[in-house]
Amino acid sequence: MITAFLGIGSNMPGDVGSPTAQIERAYELLAMHPAIEIVEKSRIFVTPPWGGVEQQEFRNSVVAVRTSLDPLALLHHCQFAEAVAGREREVRWGPRTVDVDILFCFDAQSQPLQSQGKWGFELVIPHPYAHERAFVLVPLSDLQLAREPWCTLGGRGILEWLEEVDPAERKAIVPADRSELSVPGEDQSLGTNTRTKDEG
């Protein structure tokens, strides 16, 4: 079994509705695989556009999953979830209906996995830019698992990386309004995240 952290983002409406709805649909599609268990989900955050392309603000989330799939097979299921959710992305770092990225993974002994060229350009883990991006680090730091001592990225804790992000960038990222959620009663304003099954 491996534990993987996946980043999910959207800033275009798709077949199921708003960007927030697209992310929620991606959760469902990931969980459809019998070998994937969603352990914890961050809140969905509103994040400014990134990459120098003029576009709408994003919605971003991070989920932690446990799976018996190897990382490449997990990537292929992420791509399946993108396709079923109607992924459209025509410009690098531009607008997209939904994007599901593997950020980093750990083996059953909580040791970090590294691709080291094993899967060529198809999959590089850890994600080479995850530690630089506030829209990844803020949702990631929302997870209890990401605060565990073993959960490191490039040998450093997630909160350490987050401290290096420009404070203005961090401040610009806020939880999505709960009215956007499919279950509006879920409170995203209290700093709580969502664990599934019996994870506490």
Image (tube, rainbow, N blue to C red):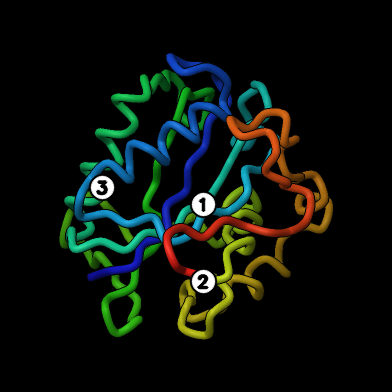
Residue annotated with mark 3:
75
- Looking at the picture, how far across and down is residue 87, in whole percent? 38, 23
Q: Going 51% across and 60% down the picture, which residue do you hit?
A: 195
Say what secondary structure mark 3 lies in: helix
- Looking at the picture, how far across and down is residue 200, in whole percent? 53, 70
Q: Going 43% across and 14% down the picture, which residue do you hit?
A: 15
Say what secondary structure mark 2 lies in: helix
- Vertical position of residue 82 compared to residue 127: above or below: above
Instruction: Determine which of the numbered discs, if any, sits on residue 145 in the image.
Output: 2
Instruction: Say few, some or many: other residues with alpha carbon within 10 Å of mark 3 (under 14 / 14 to 19 / 20 or more).
Output: some
Asked whether residue 194 is in view, the answer is yes
Horizontally, residue 196 falls left or right of residue 133, namely left
Residue annotated with mark 1:
62
Tell which tag, 2 or 3, sits nearer the viewer. 2
- The quarter holding residue 100 reads top left
- Looking at the picture, how far across and down is residue 94, in whole percent? 53, 25
Residue flagged by tag 1: what amino acid is it? Val
